[in-house]
């Protein structure tokens, strides 16, 4: 059983900052890729940022230069530092991880429960 638990969402004014955190726990052998997605009402869920086990990152064009993703492989955590937030960043943010588990011996994507980020203008 694997769980992803997110924290750090909330309400912030435009130009402000928030930091999202996600911790994975359970029967984990290796986490190959971790990332953050977001979904606004009536929209599809889109990638915000992702990071591989080796530290390679990629970002959505809309957040480049404002958001920074990082991970701690020893703690199985991933963070998203969000600066200069804009109203269009308002969405539910979901943690995602591609996890190779021990029991069962398999690799698949796991999702967190989501955390709301609201940016007021």
Image (cartoon, grey):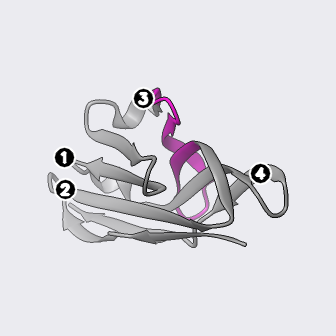
Dot placed on the residue nearer the N-terminal end, 1 or 4: 1
The residue wearing badge 2 is 17
Camera-side mark, 4 or 2 = 4
Q: Distance from label 4 to label 2 (Cα)?
A: 32 Å
SS for callout 2: loop
Q: Nearer the viewer, residue 120 or 26?
A: 26
Which label's residue is closer to the chain start, 2 or 1? 2
What is the C-alpha distance between the residues marked 3 and 4? Answer: 26 Å
Contact? badges 4 and 2 (CB < 8 Å): no
Estimate the spatial distance between the alpha carbons at disc 3 and disc 2, rounded to whole Å.
18 Å
**Relative to residue 110, is residue 51 depicted above or below?**
above
Residue at image x 26%, y 31%? 65
Q: Residue at x 36, y 66 (%)?
A: 117
Give SS at disc 3.
helix
Residue 84, labelled with which disc?
Answer: 1
Q: Which residues are magenta?
A: 33-57
Q: Quick one: quadrant of the C terminus?
A: bottom left
Find residue 24 and report its horizontal and vertical position in percent: 54, 63
Q: Nearer the viewer, mark 1 or mark 4?
A: 4
Please report contact status of discs 3 and 4: CB closer than 8 Å, yes or no: no
Q: CA distance from mark 3 to mark 1?
A: 15 Å
Mark 3 or mark 2: whose residue is earlier in sequence? 2
SS at badge 1: loop
Point out residue 35 in the picture as x, y percentages from the top left corner. 52, 46
Mark 4 crowd level (few <14, some 14–19, many ≥20, 10 Å Cα): few
Residue 2 vs residue 72: left or right?
right
| Residue holding disc 3 | 61
Using the numbered discs, state the Cα–Cα distance from disc 1 to disc 4 in whole angstroms: 33 Å
Q: Are marks 2 and 1 in contact (CB under 8 Å)?
A: yes
- Circle 4 is placed at which residue position? 108
């Amino acid at each position: 059983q694997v769980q992803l638990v997110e924290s750090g969402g909330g309400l912030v004014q435009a130009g402000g900052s928030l930091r999202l955190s996600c911790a994975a726990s359970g029967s984990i052998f290796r986490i190959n890729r971790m990332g953050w997605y977001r979904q606004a009402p009536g929209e599809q869920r889109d990638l915000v940022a992702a990071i591989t086990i080796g530290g390679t990152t990629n970002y959505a064009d809309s957040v480049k230069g404002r958001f920074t993703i990082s991970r701690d492989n020893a703690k199985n955590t991933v963070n998203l530092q969000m600066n200069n937030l804009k109203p269009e960043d308002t969405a539910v943010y979901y943690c995602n991880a591609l996890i190779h588990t021990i029991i069962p011996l398999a690799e698949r994507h796991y999702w967190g429960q989501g955390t709301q980020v609201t940016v007021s203008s």
